[in-house]
Image: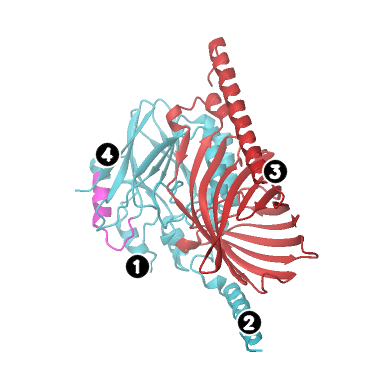
Amino acid sequence: MKTSSPNNQSDKDLKQTDMHSKRNSGTYFVGLLIVICTNLTAQPGFTIYTDLGENNVSGGLFIKSATMGHIKSGKNRLETGFEINLKNNNHVLFSGYTINASRFFLIKSHPIELQGFCTWAYNSQLLRETNLGALLNMKRSRFEMKIGTNFRTYAFRNQVIMDYGIDKSSVRIHENFNIMYLFVYYFKKADDHWNIGLTVTNIDRFTINQETNPSLSLRGSYSPGPQVSLYAESWYKTAGATNLAINHFGFYLRTGIIWNFN
Amino acid sequence: MELQLKNRLLHLTAISIVFASCEKIQDIPGSEHSVNQRFSQSMEWNETHPYHEILVQTDDYSLLFMGDSHVGTTNNLMKFFNIAKSANSSAVVMAGDLTTGDRTGYSMLDRCLPQRDSLLSFLTVGNHDLWEKYGWEEFFTRFGPSCYLFMVKSPVATDLYICLDSGSGTTGTDQLEWLKSILQNLRPEFRRCVIFTHNNFFRFRHTETVNPPVEELTVLIELFTRHNVDMLITGHDHKRDAVLFGITTYIVMEPVKDGTDNAGYLELRVKNGDIKYSFENFD
């Protein structure tokens, strides 16, 4: 473990100040975007959900909760949210943050959504994972497809770099591009007040798995009114599926609410 | 009316596919033996077969590592064993996908393996070795466990080598607990620690091969860092790579498989505590 001299300490303070100012700039930027996008025609909304489940590395039951907020204005949509660990064996409370911006347009009268996003996942006390990417979303009455690509970076946290004396050149790893996909088939049309959907995907709000590690999900939703939708999902995760030596990896249940203020 | 009928037929088809898939899960190759079952059998085997401790005369020894021989044919594999013998390697380590999954491959590999008094070999499974229903039985009966330890003891210090089973894409709950326990309790007694398994961790190129899910990678990288694991040696991707991330070097070996342009292996040399590796190709 490295020790800190007074000079190193002041360097550290400077770095921390720099980090804080970067964070403040980020918050200011996000706030500014929200203000810009908010006008009289803007449609805000939020999503809250909770996951309960288990996987091969969770050491028993895990409980997570996430809150997402969005604003839609004309053809643009901005969404941001965070995830917290309520019960897990990794001793991390704040486990994810995401921001995405979308633009809606028509191709041959079919609505298409183009989304750019950045996600930070903190599922370890030592590491953080960053994903930058873009998704194309096509939605028909019974079928939804998202396809896109992301670039993943694993990096050690600043304190860990100092504690373990990690060399600057080995602090992070950038992976090659990954293909993201989501295919949903809905049993009823999208405008119905209840629906059931089957999904195959490698993406979730804060977790993007390798394209070779798909998950299956069954989703049921019910809209008691035009602005509110309640939903429940069961997710099954596999390992090794595309190499034909398959193993169970995990299972979780999600319940949530989507509220749009039109 | 026609539209409703069409929709009902679509739903019926979707429901049938789901239920048919559930019934067929048992028919998916490799689904008969979960990694937990293989781990359990391996531990039973380990209880009656103590871990190997290789004694070396000086603090300068080498091990040869290989993976992905996909036997089949054995030209490169035989070259590999001959090189190991002539280089006076302390042992060879074989990191999975040793067969194509065809039953004849296991017996062919068995015949090729050097006698233990001439050259020690340490094997583990890859996804190909588990493909068919009989894959794990064939492997386990002939070659023993897929998860174990061995040690190399020089006059100065002892180094720890840990073999993990990642053939079905995950370490599984039980093996992970075992690994945690080994790293917490045993690791401090050893100078160097090298882990070998089949599946590579990172995707440095775009590939169709499977890696452990990202949730698992995070946990394993954290464990390796906390417990000062020097090196992870893997195969699977058939393209060499080596990167130092944190304090651990993550290595992907080239395949030994006959007919591949980049066929090769890895030499690991430990000299006076320094650990060095080199990728070697067949002529």
Residue drawn at point x = 24 percent, y = 48 percent: B82
Q: Numbered disc 1: what chain?
A: B
Residue B224 in the figure: left or right of residue A88: left
Give the Cα separation between the discs numbered 4 and 3: 54 Å
Colour scheme employed for the rendering of this structure:
by chain
x and y percentages locating residue A178 in the rendered image: 46, 52
| N-terminal-most mark, 2 or 1 | 2
Disc 1 target residue: B104
Query: Can residue A214 be seen by looking at this rendering?
Result: no
Q: Numbered disc 4: what chain?
A: B
Residue B179 in the figure: left or right of residue A230: left
> Can you say which quadrant of the picture contains the N terminus of chain B?
bottom right
Give the Cα separation between the discs numbered 2 and 4: 70 Å
For mark 1, give the secondary structure.
Answer: helix
Disc 4 target residue: B88
Q: On screen, A11 above or below B278?
A: above
Disc 2 target residue: B7
Classed neighbour count for the residue bearing mark 2: other residues with Cα under 10 Å, few (<14), some (14–19), many (≥20): some
Chain identifier matching the red colour in the rendered picture: A
Q: Is residue B126 magenta?
A: no
